[in-house]
Image (cartoon, helix red, strand yellow):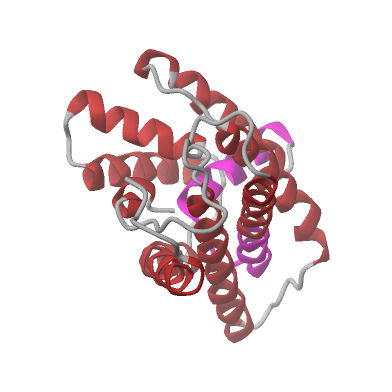
Amino acid sequence: MSESKFLKLAKKVPTTTWSSPDPMSTKPKFNTLVILIIGLWIFGTGDAVIIAAGMGVAPWTVLAQGIGIQFNWTIGEATFFISVVVLFLWIPLREKPGIGTILNAILIAAAIDVMEPHLPHPQEQIYQLIQVLFGTILVGIGSGFYLTANLGPGPRDGWMTGLQRITNIPIGRVRTTIETIALLIGWKLGGVFGLGTIIFAILIGPIVALFLQLTDRIWGTSEPIS
C-alpha cells in the first residue's frame, strides 16, 4: 500500500457519513463497505497505472516486482504474498486485523493484475511522467476513501504501527526504515527503481492529506477519528 501515511495522518482522518465507529467491526454498514471496496480498488488501479508507466514504482511494489521475477509470479500475486507474510509478522506484535485489513490484501493485489494489462505502456518519458503523476493521484484518492472507512489498517501499516508501539521509535523513522529495506531487497531481486519511485515517495503524503481535507469539507460530520 502502496499503500498511505496511516499513523501520521490518523489524527487528521475525518469522520464521514460512511465511517465505521469501530475499526474492528465485523458488521459494518453497507455504504462503509462499499466505500472501502471502491477505495481499495482505486488504490490498486493507481498502483497499476504507475507500474504500466515503466518509470519506477512505489517501494513495496519494487519488492513485489522483484519477488514476481524470482518466482515467475504476477505483481498482484507477489503483492498478495507480501501482505500475507506481513500479517504473520503481526502475531508477535499482538495486532488485530479488521475487515479492511483483509480486503486490503486481496483487492489491491487483484486490481493490479486486472487493470495493468489494459493500461497504456508509454515509451516517451513525458507520457510516462504524466502516467506516474496520475497513478499517484489515484493511490492518494483510494487511500483517502480507505482511511475514512475506518475498518482497520492495511497489513503494512499495522506492522509499522505495531513496531512503533513496542520499540517507541518515531513513526517516521520506522516507516522510512521499513520502506527502504523493502525497496533495496526488491531492487536487488530485479524490481524497478526509478524517477517514478521518487515522485511517488514525495507526492503521496501531500496528496492523501489533500484528499482527506476535501473529504472532510464535503462529507465530514463530526470530530476526526482518533
Q: Does residue 162 appear left or right of residue 217 in this picture?
A: left
> Residue visible at 76% across and 49% down?
113
Say whether residue 68 is visible: yes
| Whether residue 55 can be seen here | no
- Of residues 130 and 225, the one nearer the viewer is 225
Residue farthest top in this picture: 92
Q: Which of 3 and 57 is in front in this view?
A: 3
Which residue is at a point 77% across and 59% down the rendered structure image?
A: 115
The single residue placed furthest to the front in the displayed view is: 222
- Say above or below: 86 vs 63: above
Image: 42 above or below 177: below
Question: Magenta region's main secondary structure?
Answer: helix
Give 152 or 82, whichever is nearer the viewer.
152
Q: Picture coordinates of residue 12 (x, y %)?
A: 32, 58
Within the image, what quadrant is residue 210 found in?
bottom left
Residue farthest bottom in this picture: 126
Residue drawn at x 68%, y 38% as measured from the top left: 106
**Which image quarter is the C terminus in?**
top left
Above or below 174: residue 58: below
Q: Is residue 81 above or below residue 89?
A: below
Is 207 on the left or on the right of 170, as rendered?
A: right
Q: How many dots with numbers? A: 0
Residue 102, given in percent of the width and then of the height, sits at: 61, 32
Per the image, is 52 magenta?
Answer: yes
Q: Where does the magenta region start and end?
A: 45-72
Residue 161 shown in magenta: no
Residue appearing at x 60%, y 33% in the figure? 99
Where is residue 198? Give x, y as percent. 41, 65
Measuring from the top left, give residue 116's x and y in whole percent: 75, 59
